Image: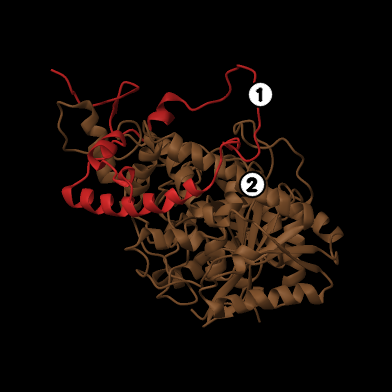
Chain colours: A brown, B red
Amino acid sequence: MQELYYKTASELSELLDKKELSAVELTKTVIERTKAVEDRVAAFNSYDEADALKQAEASDLRRAGGKTLGPLDGIPVGIKDVLAVKDQPLTCSSKMLENFVSPYDATCIQKLRSNGAVLWGRLNMDEYAMGSSTENSAFKKTSNPWNLDCVPGGSSGGSAAALAAGEAPLTLGSDTGGSIRQPASYCGVVGLKPTYGRVSRFGLAAFASSLDQVGPMARSVKDAAMLLQGIAGHDERDSTSYRADVPDYLAAMESLKGKKWTLGLPKEYFENVSDESAMKPVQDAIEFYRSLGCEIKEVSLPHTEYAVATYYIIATAEASSNLARYDGIRYTHRAEAFDAKDSVDIYCQSRAEGFGEEVKRRVILGTYVLSSGYYDAYYLKAQKVRTLIRRDFENAFKEVDAILAPTSPSTAFKKGEKTADPLSMYLSDIYTISANLAGIAGLSLPCGYSDGLPVGLQVLGKPFKEEEILAVAQAFESAHDFKNQHPNL
Amino acid sequence: MSKKTHIDIDYTAKLARIALSDEEKAKYSEQLDSIIGYVEKLEELDTSDVEPTAHPHPVSNVWQEDKVSSELSVQEALKNAPAQRDNMIVVPKVVD
């Protein structure tokens, strides 16, 4: 029998509805499970038991009064430590914000509250979401529940590991270059990066504003759809959020069931495969779609080889500008010792103490590509190549409904393996970053194992057509058993 | 490697407002040189007729009423300040 803490959110939601389970019982189970495994997994930066139980009690009261707020009512949702939750810490896993307590709610958090979700715990991440392994956290190293010597991926490593370890039935992550999808693939869970503009960024600590998106992470495709429903939509506090109606995702997926999709395989993603055994489950998944009667077609994304370079110029440039707000004056760590004759020195010293190695590296790189004399050669050039990458996808989507690809070139790597060589770490995002540059939707779902570690299948879709990639993913998931397979912890 | 890949680390770190130790300067110079060398592959592409993309789905002319809504109180806004007094952030004295 499936342990309660490994049930999907939709199963839990049914149990709550039938009054076979209370939100307090569920929350207590999640808290107990977290306490039992956290010394090995280290997914959370912090959690507030009393606050979670109070929210659960309120949910049970609503239910008893017949005023339940929908499928998320009473379901604990773990929150990546990059989103503002009123009166809770918001650290971005950085020393800079070690003592910061958020005075307001992010829009997606406010929406979750109005849907009755139990906001649960602050999940570890790479500092300011910069990284692919969660090793850049200033506080702790999260382990991959499938193999504790391996990284959970990043930057939403805590969000993925907590799901795989049964420490939360749902979590929120954020994805700037693959930070939801890559850890989802490493930890054997589902992660969805919505189309840019689908989910409000208000209250998300900004890394690269033209790339960042908040998205759902879950143990099943249906759960991811349910959580997306709870956070999507236009927000007047984020002027880049899109004014478009949000469909009923579960209903839309139901109506798309059995559709014979035309699915594209980008030839550039299947050339020069370095890890053949990690590619095998992806190939099997493609064959599965063929067996369903889907048309599988080769497509070309000719500017793929320029994506990593484009990304690291644009993302670091935007980061250097966004992170200028952490100045040591207003709400961050402030250095004690500095040269008081120079007002700039207090910024320089506070930032030297507050930022970790990768953040400094990226802020300096971003400053360089924006600096006088280099702006045109790097930043403007990268924005132009970004147009070419976006057009590649527009052209591909004229021929296919969605694109299938690996999520990552390899499975979870060993801790410490890539920390000395930033460029090799950056290249582990090669299949995910193009979706951020093009602003399209993408998800990763478990499709098998290589040497006991989960492998992710990536489904990329048209802008604002999240329901389509969810339906494509569900067609695979419903014929396989991966969502019920869990690590031995 | 062309000359411009050699980042002036003192100048750039100062612009970025980050104090670096000598060891950090040496390490970052080397790593950033290799990253900049890598991103220079974009030069291979002719982009003379290509418009830059700033946002993937540009939204323009977003207008809003200029009205006061419920915002943070001064006390709430100052809650995270390293030092505060009389509804103001206290900063160290930097001039005589």
Percent coordinates x, y for residue A130 in the rendering:
43, 52
In the figure, A440 relative to A145: above or below?
above
Question: Taking B46 as reference, is A397 left or right?
Answer: right
Residue A44 appears left or right of B22 = right
Q: Identify the residue at horizontal 64%, vertical 37% (top origin).
A: A241
Instruction: Find numbered disc 2 in the image and state the secondary structure of the residue it sits on.
Output: helix
* Residue A74 visible from this viewpoint: no
The secondary structure type at the circle numbered 1 is loop
Q: Where is residue B65 in the image (x, y as percent from the top left)?
A: 64, 18
Q: Residue A391 — which label? A: none
Residue pictured at 61% horizontal, 79% vertical: A280
Front residue of this view, candidates A385 and A61: A385
Q: Residue A390 carries which label?
A: 2
Q: Residues within 10 Å of mark 1 (few under 14, many from 20)?
A: few
Asked whether residue A63 is in view, the answer is yes
The CA span between labels 2 and 1 is 23 Å
Residue A88 placement, left or right of A216? left
**What is the total number of numbered labels drawn onto the structure image?**
2
Which amino acid type is shown beneath numbered disc 2? Arg
Query: Are the numbered discs 2 and 1 placed on the same chain, yes or no?
Result: no
Q: Please, what is the three-letter code of the amino acid marked with disc 1?
A: Asn
Neighbour class for label 2 at 10 Å: few (<14), some, many (≥20)?
many
Q: Where is residue A141 in the image (x, y as percent from the top left)?
A: 37, 64
In the picture of the structure, the residue carrying the numbered disc 1 is B61
